[in-house]
Amino acid sequence: MDYEFLIKDINLNRSQKKIGTDKGLAKIGDGIVNLTYSIAKSVFLTKNSSNEKIVRTGVKVNKKILANALKNANMKNFAKTRADAHDLADTTEALVAYVWLSNHISLYELIDFLSSSLSGDLTLRNEEIESATEAFTNLLNYIKQFLPES
Amino acid sequence: MDYEFLIKDINLNRSQKKIGTDKGLAKIGDGIVNLTYSIAKSVFLTKNSSNEKIVRTGVKVNKKILANALKNANMKNFAKTRADAHDLADTTEALVAYVWLSNHISLYELIDFLSSSLSGDLTLRNEEIESATEAFTNLLNYIKQFLPES
């Protein structure tokens, strides 16, 4: 199936701000980000387990991580003017939803992209924040090619 | 990609309770359920819009809906004994995660299954609860074939 019809209105006259400030896209993206990061973290922890323990976990990705990733990828142009951290995180989520709904990236690719960008000891809060921020920064830099230039 | 290695331990000695009471599976399933229902609801509302309005929305599926769906599908055997509504909902989520991680159903199939089971006026809270309960009941009845018989 194909859900591109859910972004038909946005594509009629697409722009960075139209995609990045869409509240519905951000809501869908919130679900995509949390699910793909949860599985990416489970994959990473399982592959790097010292005792072959399988880890399954679910995580709500912190808004600050998503906001900082947007800044690090130099993609604040997609957010509304005078955006706070919450707005910037919403923009990251909207962009992820947009490229997924556009069929430019699959859920599996998102998970593989994130899990292969993770590093360090994710059981330590500070290391996870740093590692997750880098993973989402890499992801945003990658999906930039599928987004409008202005 | 394939994440079946994330359920290797469960499959070594799989049983209804082992799958249905796994907390990690429930966490992953929570993300799958919320994302797939959000897109299914967006698809349903967009296809049934009277003025061709495109709707994008994100929803956290109520635990009672998931608990009642498990009861309606006669699948309480998968839950722990003396389970409350929250436990039953976790079981529904764990089962969905299990069949997805087993590659028995794709995210697209989950979304299509749910959206085609929805009906009524979802903007009315009571109608949405009734319709979503039926959709998840149908889904559980469908995925039963991929789950152990005891």
Image (cartoon, coloured by chain):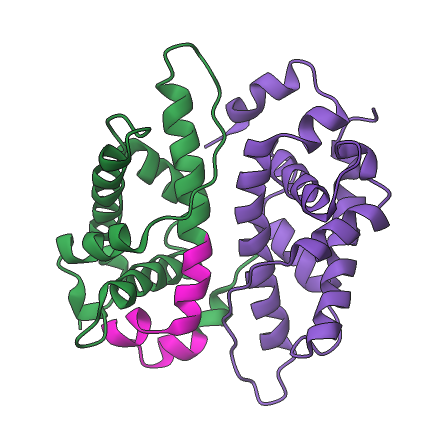
Chain colours: A purple, B green
Q: Is residue B45 above or below residue B137?
A: above
Which quarter of the figure is the C terminus of chain B placed in? Answer: bottom left
Q: Is residue B99 above or below residue B119?
A: below
Q: Is residue A142 above or below residue A125?
A: above
Question: Residue B72: in sight, yes or no?
Answer: yes
Left or right, B6 with reference to A86: left
On the image, the x and y values in percent for residue B118 come to 27, 33
Dominant SS of magenta comes to: helix
- Total residue callouts: 0
On the image, the x and y values in percent for residue B144 come to 22, 57
- In the image, the segment drawn in magenta is B8-31
Question: Residue B15: in sight, yes or no?
Answer: no
Q: Is residue B9 magenta?
A: yes
On the image, the x and y values in percent for residue B111 come to 39, 40
> What residue lies at 62% left-to-right and 83% top-to-bottom?
A49
Q: Is residue B114 magenta?
A: no
> What residue lies at 53% left-to-right and 84% top-to-bottom?
A53
Q: Quadrant of residue A21?
A: top right
Q: Quadrant of residue A22?
A: top right
Outermost bottom residue? A51
Left or right, A67 with reference to B48: right
> What residue lies at 54% left-to-right and 40% top-to-bottom?
A27
Which quarter of the figure is the N terminus of chain B placed in? Answer: bottom right
On the image, the x and y values in percent for residue B29 come to 41, 59
Q: Quadrant of residue A136?
A: bottom right
